Image (spheres, helix red, strand yellow):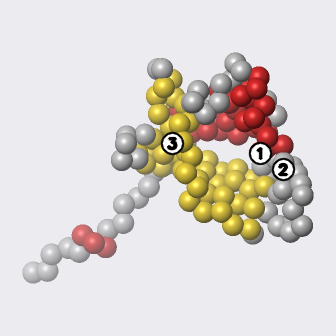
Amino acid sequence: MAEPQAANIVPRLVENVNSDQTNLVKSYFAGMEAKNYAQACAAVSPDRCRATNPTSVELFSREHQKLTNGYEYVNVKDLGFRSPSGKDVVCVKYSYRYKDDADPRLVSEILSFYVDSVDGRFQITDRVCEKKYKE
């Protein structure tokens, strides 16, 4: 009698729709889109941006200010992944256009946002770009 093929079983990913990690990343993007850079800055760890320091917030906002219409597409998913260091990983795809780009196509990025507890609350500690391309 043949044994079942375990290699053919594909694990099913389940999205954590309203996890604290997902909501944190969504609040980061909401702050960016509202141009409330202090709110977005507060979602990341203090070694990346200090929301109470106007200079830090201004430096943090510079890249977003180069965009024509901000983020034109944002998709955030928490599929329950953890990094080898134990941080939660939230998957994000977003698209935008640069103001001074001669090629008007959308630039899209797929990133992993690493979320960890910092001083008792979740914060985005790192972002790792998986892919960047023009659509």
Query: In the drawing, does residue 115 fall left or right of residue 57?
Result: left
In this view, the residue in front, 1 or 92, is 92
Q: Given contact means CB atoms under 8 Å apart, are the residues at marks 1 and 2 in contact?
A: yes
Q: Secondary structure at mark 3?
A: strand
Q: Residue at x 82, y 34 (%)?
A: 35
Residue that label 2 marks: 67
Task: Name the N-terminal-most of marks 1 and 3.
Answer: 1
Residue that label 1 marks: 63
In this view, the residue in front, 81 or 5, is 81
Alpha-carbon span between mark 2 and mark 3? 24 Å
Q: Secondary structure at mark 1?
A: helix
- Mark 2: few, some, or many residues within 10 Å (few <14, many ≥20)? some
Alpha-carbon span between mark 1 and mark 3? 20 Å
Quadrant in the rendering for residue 36: top right
Residue 115 in percent (x, y) is at: 50, 37
In this view, the residue in front, 21 or 119, is 119
Residue that label 3 marks: 114
Amino acid type for the residue under numbered disc 3: Tyr
Viewport quadrant of the C terminus: bottom right
- Mark 3: few, some, or many residues within 10 Å (few <14, many ≥20)? many
The reply to whether residue 77 is visible in this rendering is no
The reply to whether residue 8 is visible in this rendering is yes
**Residue sitting farthest toward the bottom:** 1
Q: Residue at x 44, y 55 (%)?
A: 13
Quadrant in the rendering for residue 57: top right
Question: Which mark, residue 22?
Answer: none
Residue 97 in percent (x, y) is at: 82, 57
In this view, the residue in front, 62 or 6, is 62
Q: Residue at x 75, y 35 (%)?
A: 59
Amino acid type for the residue under numbered disc 2: Leu
